[in-house]
Amino acid sequence: MHYVAPVPIGGPRDMEGPTSGRSPQGGSAFHSLRDYEPGDDTRLIDWKATARTGSLTVRHNVVPDEPRHLIVLDTSAQVYSGTSFEDAVRVAASLCAAAGRAGFPVDLRLTDAPDRADSELGALDLLSGVDCVASGAGLSGLVGVVEDVLMLSDATALSVVTGRPAPEHLDLLATLRPRFLTIGFVQICEPPSVAPAGVISVSAPTSERFAAAWNHLAPQ
């Protein structure tokens, strides 16, 4: 494992943070305006909006979404050669540790196994015994892997760690890009495939070279 900078979540963390319709109600972060319902706290009435619409309108406050970092490790043997899978595992572990240091909730998923971890320590434990799968689907199932995380929060950064991906997997990244705060794409191979626009892409033959390249690229 290497010391790497955390994935940029999209600028400084707002004290209130981003919100979504799935955020728990009753917090301090403003999400939207809605019609008054019996039992609402009258202190939440927005009198300007009420005067404009002619009906009682309240501020819909929620608990802000906390940015999450989802790390997906491609465990399909087809995309790796030599010892590159071991390097990919070290990269995934380094990213999990970086997210933990930055205070972001960590979600680790594997492409070809149901195993998952939702904490830094759990992720490192899972990675300590992970193996690649000879006939794995790899990134072909990426959308299914990330879908349940997106159901929990819109405020999610994604990092994908793989070897040499197939062209259609790059198309998947382009499709997913608008749904995440940011996407990091790590290829343990040379030469690399060209990542879609808007994706933070780093390629290297080893995890050590990745760490050096990533720390040069990412804001400290």
Image: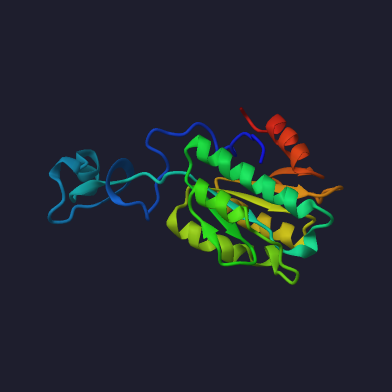
Residue placed furthest toward the top: 220
**Residue 52, how many percent across, how many down?**
24, 44
**Residue 104, how many percent across, how many down?**
48, 41
Q: How is the image coloured?
A: rainbow
**Residue 114, how many percent across, how many down?**
56, 67
Q: Is residue 61 visible?
A: yes
The answer to whether 79 appears left or right of 217 in the picture is: right
Looking at the picture, does residue 99 appear above or below residue 23?
above
Instruction: Count the numbered circles shown.
Output: 0
Residue placed furthest toward the right: 191
Q: Quadrant of the C terminus?
A: top right
Residue beneath the point at 63% across and 57% down: 129
Looking at the picture, does residue 56 appear above or below residue 150?
above
Q: Nearer the viewer, residue 68 or 176?
A: 68
The answer to whether 72 appears left or right of 203 in the picture is: left
Q: Is residue 179 visible?
A: no
Residue beneath the point at 24% across and 48% down: 53
Looking at the picture, does residue 208 appear above or below residue 156?
above
The answer to whether 179 appears left or right of 74 in the picture is: left
**Residue 63, how many percent across, how many down?**
32, 45
Q: Nearer the viewer, residue 46 or 129?
A: 129
Q: Quadrant of the N terminus?
A: top right
